[in-house]
Image (cartoon, helix red, strand yellow):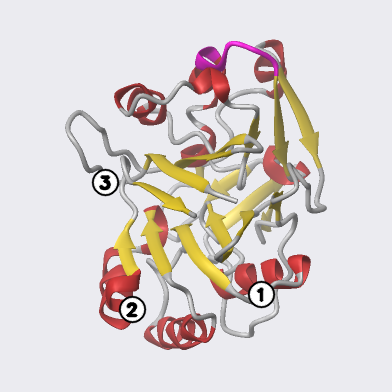
Amino acid sequence: MKAKITTLAENTASGGGVLGEWGLSILVETGEATVLLDTGGPELSAAHNAHRLGKDLSAVEKIVLSHGHFDHTGGLVEMLNRIKKPVEIIAHPQIWAQKYAKVPNRSERYIGVPFPRQMIESMGAIFSLTADPVKISDNIMTTGEIEIQTDYEEIDDFLFEKRDEKWVPDTVPDDLSLIIRTDSGLAVITGCAHRGIINTLRHAQKLTGIDHIHTVIGGIHLFRASEERLALTVADLHEFGIQRLGVSHCTGQLAAAQLAQEFGDTFFFNNAGTSLVID
């Protein structure tokens, strides 16, 4: 099966008229389905870039939200305006948690979904909320809630939920990714991989029964990683035999530079405007 993957929103941009924004949105087009993973941030670069890249958003059949942070959901209302029809939104129930960044010596900052659920539903959104994997088509599925297997991939300690006026560490159980089966192997598309990129890839292998991961695209949340964690991540990534590694968003520039050095021609910066075909 052939899959065309186009990044609509990312921190950096390539191509004339394409905008960068802190956030992520990736469009997946196959012969089976057209699926949007995330909607970018509140600056609405995803919708703008879709137009610049000639992408007809009315063709989107389903939206998958990787997790409930503003930089992955902030463009949702504008995307629904462009889709112009009822559309299913697949996500984990915890996307509606009251999510905050709480850094010592700074005031807490709300970083959750910036719209009320009722508003989004009034625009035609039909939410399918589950912690389980969801089969979108014969060859596309979500990971569902990702099992933590490694002992070195940690959740950021500044992420919290507010529950009954109490602060509770957010383990980001809503973090999920897309898995695409292709003739070349699996393609795994991540939002932020808050639960760890290695955990995510191993989870994809376990769900599908397929060991070979051909392509990894998206944020892999290493911008605050220690040298030890980064070294362990690189070593484990090599074990998968990945043939395309396109990093985005929350990977971090230093981590991305090291991945570029380690993976050579396999590596690319997955900017807004990047498009690739897995045949």
Q: Position of residue 163 (x, y in %)?
A: 74, 45
At 47% from the left and 63% from the top, the residue drawn is 220
Q: Position of residue 55 (x, y in %)?
A: 41, 26
Tag 3 or tag 1, which sits nearer the N-term? 3
Q: Which residue is the extreme one toward the left?
A: 16
At 50% from the left and 34% from the top, the residue drawn is 39
**Circle 2 crowding by C-alpha within 10 Å: few under 14, some 14–19, many from 20:** some
Q: Does residue 9 appear to the left or right of 260 in the view shown?
A: right
Query: Does 189 lie within the magenta span?
Result: no
Label 3 is placed on what type of residue? Thr
Is disc 1 placed on a helix, strand or loop?
helix
**Circle 3 crowding by C-alpha within 10 Å: few under 14, some 14–19, many from 20:** some
Label 2 is placed on what type of residue? Phe
At 78% from the left and 47% from the top, the residue drawn is 134
In this figure, which residue is indicated by the disc labeled 2?
A: 263
62 is higher (above) or lower (below) than 80: below
Is disc 3 placed on a helix, strand or loop?
loop
Q: CA distance from mark 3 to mark 2?
A: 21 Å
Is disc 2 placed on a helix, strand or loop?
helix
Q: Position of residue 147 (x, y in %)?
A: 74, 69
In this figure, which residue is indicated by the disc labeled 3?
A: 12
Tag 2 or tag 3, which sits nearer the N-term? 3
Q: Position of residue 139 (x, y in %)?
A: 70, 51
Disc number placed over residue 8 in the picture, else none: none
Which residues, given as a range, are shown in magenta? 81-86
Label 1 is placed on what type of residue? Arg
The quadrant in which residue 36 appears is top right
In this figure, which residue is indicated by the disc labeled 1?
A: 202
